[in-house]
Image (cartoon, helix red, strand yellow):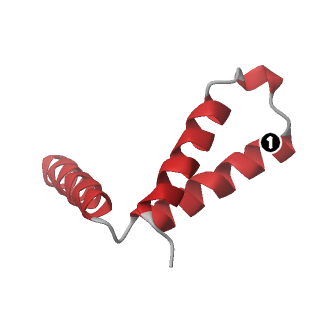
């Protein structure tokens, strides 16, 4: 089973990849970064941290949708 240590490793990889300048990235690098971010979301999703982030985003979206109505 995956642990939060894998999540930390993926987070470090994502941060390091996103620090590079956009002009220096190829399409393959951008695709790989997107896959790393997806994997990070899957690993962190069921944790309390992931649930907290989900709740914050859910409240933000509901507030925006109520303001737009």
Quadrant location, the C terminus:
bottom left
Measured along the vertical axis of the image, is residue 43 above or below residue 20? below
In percent of the image, x 39 and y 66: which residue is there? 45
Left or right of 63 on screen, residue 24: right
Measured along the vertical axis of the image, is residue 61 above or below residue 43? above
Measured along the vertical axis of the image, is residue 41 above or below residue 9? below
Left or right of 41 on screen, residue 33: right
For the residue pair 33 and 61, the one nearer the viewer reads as: 33
Left or right of 30 on screen, residue 16: left
Instruction: Indicate the position of residue 33 as horizontal and vertical percent values.
Output: 68, 46
Instruction: Indicate the position of residue 9 as horizontal and vertical percent values.
Output: 56, 49
Measured along the vertical axis of the image, is residue 33 above or below residue 46? above
Q: To which residue does mark 1 refer?
A: 29
Crowd tier of the residue under label 1, counting other residues whose Cα lies within 10 Å: few below 14, some 14–19, many 20 or above: few
Q: State how many labels appear.
A: 1
In percent of the image, x 80 and y 31: which residue is there? 25
Give the quadrant of residue 59.
Answer: bottom left
Instruction: Indicate the position of residue 61 as horizontal and vertical percent values.
Output: 25, 53
In percent of the image, x 62 and y 25: which residue is there? 19
Instruction: Indicate the position of residue 39 as horizontal and vertical percent values.
Output: 58, 62
The secondary structure type at the circle numbered 1 is: helix
For the residue pair 69 and 36, the one nearer the viewer reads as: 36
Farthest residue, direction bottom: 1
Left or right of 47 on screen, residue 2: right
For the residue pair 68 and 31, the one nearer the viewer reads as: 31
In percent of the image, x 32 and y 60: which residue is there? 50
């Amino acid at each position: 089973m995956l642990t939060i240590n894998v999540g930390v490793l993926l987070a470090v990889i994502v941060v390091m990849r996103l620090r590079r300048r956009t002009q220096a990235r190829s399409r393959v690098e951008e695709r790989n970064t997107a896959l790393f971010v997806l994997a990070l979301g899957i690993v962190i999703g069921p944790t309390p941290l992931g649930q907290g982030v989900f709740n914050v985003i859910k409240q933000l979206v509901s507030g925006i949708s109520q303001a737009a109505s």
